[in-house]
Amino acid sequence: MLLVLVWIGGNMNGAMTAEENFGTQRIAYMNITDFIQEMEGEAAAAEGQTLSLQEQVKEQEALLEELGEETTVSEEKLEAMQEDIDRAEELLDREEELQADIEALEEDYDAQKADQEEALAEDLAELEQELEAKSDELEKLLADIETKEEELEAIGSSITAKQAEPVSYPAGTAIVGIDMEPGRYLAEPIGSGSNFAVYSGSGSLEYNLILSTRPDHGVEEVSIFLFDDYMIDARTPYTLTPIDE
């Protein structure tokens, strides 16, 4: 509250009466009261505005504090994001290095593969030439074998007799080394034929058959090997002709 004190002095001219002086003082007091009430109203309004401003200031301060906290959180998030970005960049750099290494390995592999393929192609060409040469040799050998087979076929696979006369032996026993020389012989029956057996020097039976000229009865001839001390036991006369293979 604003307190205003006004001193009202006497009549300046000294001619105002007491009644006039009281009336004048009363008017002046009323004006002062009205002024005081007006000022008090303005002061109250100003005080209300001040309270309102204070509340607004508090709200702004609270908002600023909240914004500060959010700013702190945002800065932490930004730092975390920056760390993630840095790690991602490191991984990207590492990936680029690995990719470069892979490309270098692939180039080296391709170069080695090309060299190996070239070497293999050369080896294959040499092998093909050798194979062709061996094939020619094989064909020649086969042709030679065929020729030899034809010659053998012409000569015959049978045993040829020596250019010697057959020697006749009677039925009975004969000892190799005494009655004939060891060797290979062609035995044939004289007449219709009969049993013909050969024993080794130890007594084991080496040959046992029927020498016969009769159809479906034994064999007409047989090739036998005779060694020292072999014994021939024949039930029919026979001939022995020395033979070679």
Image: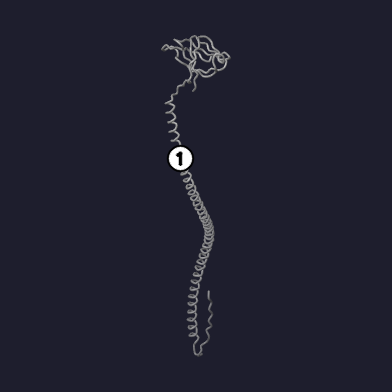
Reply above or below: 2 against 226. Answer: below
Q: Residue furthest right?
A: 202
Type of amino acid under label 1: Ala
Colour scheme employed for the rendering of this structure: one colour
Q: Position of residue 35 (x, y in %)?
A: 48, 77
From the top left corner, tell me how far across and down residue 220 is, in percent: 44, 14
User: What residue does disc 1 label?
Assistant: 133
Number of marks: 1
Q: Position of residue 27 (x, y in %)?
A: 47, 81
User: From what the image shows, is residue 77 above or below residue 27?
Assistant: above
Nearest to the observer: residue 126 or residue 9: 126
| Quarter where residue 204 is shown | top right
Position of residue 182 in the picture relative to residue 146 (left or right): right
SS at mark 1 in the image = helix
Determine crowd level at label 1: few under 14, some 14-19, many 20+ residues with C-alpha closer than 10 A. few
- 138, 72: nearer the viewer: 138
Q: How far across and how far down the image is residue 161, in percent?
A: 47, 20
